[in-house]
Image (tube, rainbow, N blue to C red):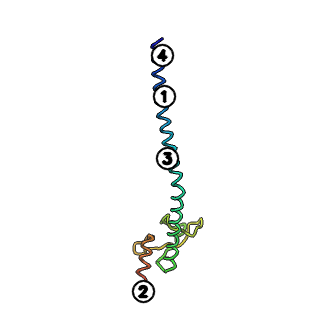
Amino acid sequence: MHEDNIAKDRACTEKDRQLAGMEKKLAETKASEEMANMMVGPLETMRFVMKQEILNIQDLVLKAGVSKKRKRESDDFQAPFYYSLGGNASKQGDLPWDSEEDRVMTPSEAVACCIEQQPSR
């Protein structure tokens, strides 16, 4: 009988340790979730602002006369995710184009091209 009580006590102690470990992991998980929830809003706002800035650059460089190419749905090249194709479902629109390298310019390349095209003072 005494040995049975010892075995039960050991089993209870082990279960208590497991439960304490699970409670600790649960608390850590809740803290991580709270931190992630606090970060999502500001990060999403930053992403939106950055996307708007890139779209503004795209619009300005195209209006400034940078070489461009009209992307059509049937074209085999992909438009970079950071550019807009006019918000239409057909995925067609003008993109800054590097004709020497036969590819879409990055925003920084398009701005540099605009600067180079400016008449010297």
Which circle marks residue 5 in the picture?
A: 4
* Precedes in sequence: disc 4 or disc 1: 4
Q: Nearer the viewer, mark 4 or mark 2?
A: 4
Q: CA distance from mark 3 to mark 4?
A: 40 Å
Which circle marks residue 119 in the picture?
A: 2
Which circle marks residue 16 in the picture?
A: 1
* Precedes in sequence: disc 1 or disc 2: 1
- In the rendered view, tell whether residue 83 sits above or below residue 64: above
Report the quarter where the C terminus lies: bottom left
Q: Residue at x 47, y 31 (%)?
A: 18
* Precedes in sequence: disc 2 or disc 3: 3
Kind of residue at badge 4 = Asn
Q: Quadrant of residue 119?
A: bottom left
**Of helix, strand and loop, which one carries label 1?**
helix
Q: CA distance from mark 4 to mark 1?
A: 16 Å
Q: Residue at x 42, y 82 (%)?
A: 117
Tell me where residue 13 appears, x and y as whole percent.
Answer: 46, 25
**Of helix, strand and loop, which one carries label 3?**
helix
Q: Nearer the viewer, mark 1 or mark 2?
A: 1
Kind of residue at badge 2 = Pro
**Of helix, strand and loop, which one carries label 2?**
loop
**Of helix, strand and loop, which one carries label 4?**
helix
Q: CA distance from mark 1 to mark 3?
A: 24 Å
Kind of residue at badge 1 = Asp
User: Dot 3 corresponds to which residue?
Assistant: 32
Tell me where residue 45 appears, x and y as whole percent.
Answer: 54, 61
Q: Residue at x 49, y 31 (%)?
A: 19
Kind of residue at badge 3 = Ser
* Precedes in sequence: disc 4 or disc 2: 4
